[in-house]
Image (cartoon, rainbow, N blue to C red):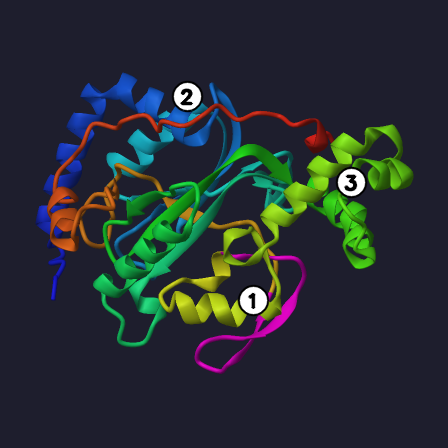
Amino acid sequence: MTVLEKLNDEELKQRYNEFAEMMSADWDYWQEYLKSFLQTEQYMLREVAFIDRDKTKFPFRTVVRSLDSLMKLIYNVGVVRGKGIAISVYDYKSFGYKSIGKRKKTIIHSSTPIIKHNWYDFDCDHKSGGELEDAYQDVLKLYDMKGKKPRIYFTGSRGFHVYVDFDFPITLEFRNKLVRNTTNIHKKKIPYTKDELIKYHGEDYEEKLDEINLFKEVTTGTKGMWYNSSCFLNVCTRFPTLDYSGLHFLEETLATDSDNKVRLVKPHYKQLARLPYTVHQGSGYYCIPVNPNWDLDRIIEESMFYHTPVPVKRKPLRIMATTRES
């Protein structure tokens, strides 16, 4: 059994000193990496959290709106002060302010996510008695079943984060539009022929066909994005270490999981994920991208050392005509 031995406080301090030195030297590499990872040149609207090793303290959370401010926060708050760094899985369209005493705090509107990927959180603590190897085997199972190969990251401690990139961004408004426009079509079982589509939708049938196919793509089982109670048990059974709180549900759902416990699962879009190439404040290991050909020993060995960030290679996001909101 592979064991991850956590660093003591003094070793962790040395690790963060190393991290600070290397990040300063690799500042330009970090900028290029974050542009590719977050898919932005400068503007963004994301939440960032900084986590103490002592988890009894509530993480410091703030909203960032530019790449420059994110870089400064990562270095000055996360690295220099020795904190774990997590960032919201999604970008958002809007934000507001919350009054706290005499000051105002910026908050994101979590109902306005711009969703550019599926995100999966595999955690060996999620399964009673589960080991890190169990989580990794579930990750590889998902990797093999996906048509588009996911990006895998070891969190540096007890699990893995997996991203399956989309070709274009999706908003909840667009998701709801798809549901409205396609539910009746599926119920009536209208054939996907040119004549039938023109009959029901007029000359814009090509756009409608795109919507129908996209709706099927993003709502079908574990290959899709939004889940309902009928497929929830199947997901939990196939991937015991998958934290289902990271899945997307069409509506508030009472679902029975693999432990035969009924749970109320609410749709939410405020998940935070460990920022790759940063130090996990609990273990002292780095969060790193994973080659699926590596075994767990190799992953842990690689996560003991700092790696210069490498930009994520993928096709640029495209904006489909059907993603324009009405």
Determine if residue 48 is in view: no
Q: Nearer the viewer, residue 104 or 290?
A: 290
Q: Amino acid at mark 3?
A: Thr
Image position of 176 (left or right of 128):
right
Between marks 3 and 1 in the image, the one whose residue lies nearer the viewer: 3
- Give the labeled residue for mark 3: 193
Measure the C-alpha gap from mark 2 to mark 1.
42 Å
* Mark 1: amino acid: Cys
Give the quarter of the image for residue 106.
top right
Assign the N terminus to one quadrant of the image: bottom left
User: What residue is drawn where x is 25% and y is 28%?
Assistant: 309
- Mark 1: few/some/many CA within 10 Å (<14, 14-19, 20+): few
Q: Within the magenta stretch, is there residue 255? A: yes
Place residue 6 in its image quadrant. bottom left
Q: Nearer the viewer, residue 13 or 204?
A: 204
Amino acid type at circle 2 is Asp
Along the polypeptide, which appears first: circle 2 or circle 1? Answer: 2
Point out residue 212 in the picture as x, y percentages from the top left corner: 71, 43
Q: Is residue 298 left or right of residue 141?
A: left
- Asked whether the residues under the numbered discs 3 and 1 touch, taking CB atoms below 8 Å apart as contact, a structural biologist would say no
Q: Nearer the viewer, mark 2 or mark 1?
A: 1
Question: Which of the pair 46/113 is nearer the observer?
Answer: 113
Residue at 87% of width from left, 37% of height from top?
Answer: 201
Q: Please state the extent of the stretch shown in magenta in the rendering.
A: 247-265
Tally of marks: 3
The answer to whether residue 58 is magenta is no
- Graded by Cα atoms within 10 Å as few (under 14), some (14 to 19) or many (20 or more), the crowding at tag 2 reads few
| Residue 151 drawn above or below residue 69 | below
**Local SS, label 3:** loop
Instruction: Give me the C-alpha separation between circle 3 and circle 2.
Output: 50 Å
Look at mark 2 in the image and give the residue it sits on.
Answer: 68
- In the picture, the quarter occupied by the C terminus is top right
